[in-house]
Every structure is written in structure tokens, then in C-alpha cells.
Amino acid sequence: NAGVMQNPRHLVRRRGQEARLRCSPMKGHSHVYWYRQLPEEGLKFMVYLQKENIIDESGMPKERFSAEFPKEGPSILRIQQVVRGDSAAYFCASSPPSGGGYTFGSGTRLTVV
Amino acid sequence: AQSVTQPDIHITVSEGASLELRCNYSYGATPYLFWYVQSPGQGLQLLLKYFSGDTLVQGIKGFEAEFKRSQSSFNLRKPSVHWSDAAEYFCAVDPYSSASKIIFGSGTRLSIRP
């Protein structure tokens, strides 16, 4: 019974490239959340998705960032034209439809050089 | 404004001593409440959670937390810390008590003095 799987664990991109971060929720979990953690800071909510729907994207930057959770396959957080300030740890969490049981993945650490 | 506050940025305690980490929230209704722990370079592990019922919640690794409605607090405690407890601790709130987003406090870094 695997937990929340995130890959890659580490990702290095040059400025201007695209970053794709993947998250496979726990079995039976239909809700996915993405959070960003800047160095020495807490976690900031980015987006909440259900299958094929974005429920709350109030924490997403207006430009360059997008997220999806297709009917089949993992959730994807996509960052276009990355800049140094995008360097952070990105965490995914999932929960069942009833809520209250959030499980986090190990995160993807993005470094922009 | 709605928020989760962890007033202590960094705490150092001696091994074997007791620990209390503070957390206050400012949401109108009683939200779902959580404590997570994060070791350096790692993900977050759930220590305990409160939804309703008994206000004293037992968690893993010997931790407990007490919900106090009158103080809007959910403080984390441990009677005797171990060196392996050194980590970052985050209080978190689901303000709508549902499968909505959860909001994290800024964290408290715990160091253990040998």
C-alpha cells in the first residue's frame, strides 16, 4: 500500500526551462493538494484538485504555473520558464473524499541554476 | 485575518526534559487541527489530529496535544524528549473541517541539548 509518490525527488533546471513535477496519490484518495516550501519557511498552499477539476487555485502564481489531475495518471504541477525564485521544495498531499486524512509525499526539490 | 500562529520560531530543550510547542488559530468555527513533523530534507509526517470529541489527543512517538476552544489553541506536548525528536514542527488547520486545503503555521524548530 504505497503512500503518496512524488517524482522526481530532485530536479535541476536552467532558467527559462520547464519543470514538471508528478504526484500519484494514495490508493483510494481522489483529492490532491500542492504546497510549496521555500528555504527556511513553512508550507504555502498552491492548489487543490480533484479528478479533472481544479477546486481551489487561490495560492497559484498567476503566470507560468499550472496544475492538472487527469482522469488517468498522476497529478502534474508544471512551471514554465523557471526563474531562480522558483527554487523550493514542492510537496503533494492527498486525501480521501471524506477529507481529514492528509498524507504527504516526500517532495520534489527544484533547483533553478 | 484568518491565520495559524506558532509564536516560537526556535526552541532548545535538554534531552529528557518536557516539551510544549504552542499553536493558536483564528478561525470562527472549530476547524480540524493537525501537528506534523519534518526532519531536514524530508517530507511531513502526521503526528496527530483533532476532529472532535476528547480534547486531549494522543499521537505517535509519545506526543499528545490538547485542544482548548476558549483559547483557540492546540499545543503539542511530550513529557520527555529524545535526541531524535530534533526537527521542524508544523501546526496546521483545515478551517472548513472538510476536504479543503489546510493552512500551515510557520513552524517551530526544535533542537535537543545533550
Image (cartoon, helix red, strand yellow):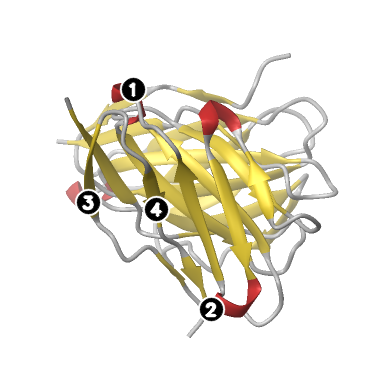
Q: Quadrant of the N terminus of chain A?
A: top right
Dot 1, how many residues are within 10 Å of its Cα: few (below 14), some (14-19), or many (20+)? few
Q: Position of residue B5 (x, y in %)?
A: 41, 68
Q: Quadrant of residue B6?
A: bottom left
What residue would you read off at disc 1? Answer: B84
Local SS, label 3: strand
Residue density around tag 4, few if under 14, some if 14–19, many if 20 or more, within 10 Å: many
Marks 3/4 same chain: yes
Residue depth check, mark 3 versus mark 2: number of the one nearer the observer: 3
Tell me where residue B30 sits by quadrant. Answer: bottom right
Label 1: which secondary element? helix
Q: Amino acid at mark 3?
A: His
What chain is tagged by disc 2? B
Amino acid type at circle 1 is: Ser
User: Do the dots labelled 4 and 2 sit on one chain?
Assistant: yes
Q: Is residue A89 left or right of residue A112?
A: right
Residues tagged 4 and 2 counted as in contact (Cβ below 8 A): no
Kind of residue sitting beneath label 2: Ser
From mark 1 to mark 3, how far is it between C-alphas? 16 Å
Q: Disc 3 or disc 4, which is closer to the eye?
A: 4
Q: Residue at x 26, y 29 (%)?
A: B15
Identify the residue at image location x=84%, y=47%.
A97
Q: Residues under labels 3 and 4: Cα distance?
A: 10 Å
Q: Is residue B20 above or below residue A77?
A: below
Q: Report the residue marked by disc 2.
A: B26
Classify B85 as above or below B74.
above
Q: Is residue A72 above or below residue A40?
A: above
Secondary structure found at label 2: loop
User: Label 4, on which residue?
Assistant: B21
Q: Amino acid at mark 4?
A: Leu
